[in-house]
Amino acid sequence: MTLPTDRYTHGHHASVVGQHARRTAERDAAYLLPYLQPGMRLLDVGCGPGTITTGLARAVAPGEVVGIDVVPAVVETARGHLAESGLTNVRFEEGSVYALAFEDGGFDVVHAHQVLQHLARPADAAREMLRVLKAGGVVAVRDADYATMIAWPRLPELDRWLSVYHAVASRNGADADAGRRLGAWLREAGFEDVRTTATAVVFADRDSVLNWGDSWADRVTHSSLAEQAIEYGLATRDDLEAIASGWRAWARHEDAFFLYVNVECVAFRPA
């Protein structure tokens, strides 16, 4: 049987990586921090530019932290960030969550931020995370649920954006509304004692609204999302340009507001 392969909906255009580089452990992995202790060994799956990874490394220092990503250029970006951080307990490697190059039971913690939503086989990925965890070890996963994304003013271009995004993710075998399914995937993989929380993300101040709106305007016209939408026949170039104009108009409205929900799960390897 041929297993489905992953195709990353966002890709790695500068507009995407730039958003990822704004993430921090203090904000984006706050649900995990209470479980961390100095000396733990931690694996960060889908580490991206490494800004969350280095924050987690500070929390477990002097414990070893390994960040992996499937894209070599992104790994190099993470290494550049590491060089600026001054940390010595972190390393970044190229690797796939489906075939982790680590021994059974080698980590106290496995973390994945906004990863499972992009995978065609999320439960298989969770099983591999389980394999490399020690007995009693903790996995922490966090994903957005795109169906919770709401904007004011409500513009037809933004409604169209959300429809196109869902359709592209679905064609890629992924689930844009993954947040609600995290607990189910973890239990399918064999985890027990799954603890689920959720956090609302709000953009309402001028700086965050402009950053969010202009970033999506760039993504919807220049990133892999745009390429895939056109390739799959889900949108034309003119459609995407109209969506981008809508994002820019929304971002400059005095009442602009955007909200969505991230779902977080912490689960434990049975002892």
Image: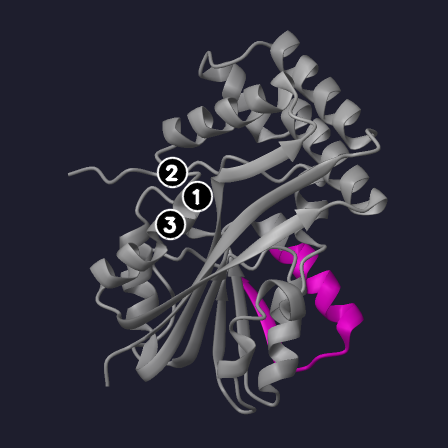
Front tag of 3 and 2: 3
Q: What is the secondary structure assignment of the residue under circle 3?
A: helix
- Point out the frontmost of discs 3 and 1: 3
163 left or right of 54 in image: left
Instruction: State the residue position of label 2.
Output: 174
Q: Which residues are magenta?
A: 75-93
Name the residue: 53% across, 13% down.
Answer: 235
Q: Amino acid at mark 3?
A: Arg
The answer to whether 120 appears left or right of 223 in the picture is left
Task: Residue at 34% x, 59% y: name it.
Answer: 99
| Residue wearing tag 3 | 180
Amino acid type, label 1: His
First in sequence: mark 3 vs mark 1: 1
Q: Is residue 90 magenta?
A: yes
Give the quadrant of the N terminus.
top left
The amino acid type of the residue labelled 2 equals Ala
**Between marks 3 and 1, how big is the CA–CA gap?**
14 Å
Separation of marks 1 and 2 at Cα, in angstroms: 5 Å
In the displayed structure, 157 sits above or below 193; it is above
Mark 1 vs 2: CB contact within 8 A: yes
Q: Around disc 3, counting alpha carbons within 10 Å, would you say few (fewer than 14), some (14 to 19), or many (20 or more)?
A: some
The picture places residue 154, in percent across and down from the top left corner, at 64, 25
Q: Was residue 102 drawn as part of the magenta stretch in this picture?
A: no
Q: Tag 2 or tag 1, which sits nearer the N-term?
A: 1
Q: Earlier in the sequence, mark 3 or mark 2?
A: 2
Residue underneath mark 1: 118
- Residue 216 in percent (x, y) is at 68, 32
Across and down, in percent, residue 158 comes to 62, 24
Q: Position of residue 229 (x, y in %)?
A: 51, 20
Residue occupying image coordinates x 38% and y 72%:
102
Q: Secondary structure at mark 1?
A: helix
Q: Looking at the image, do the residues carrying marks 3 and 2 touch, with CB atoms under 8 Å apart?
A: no
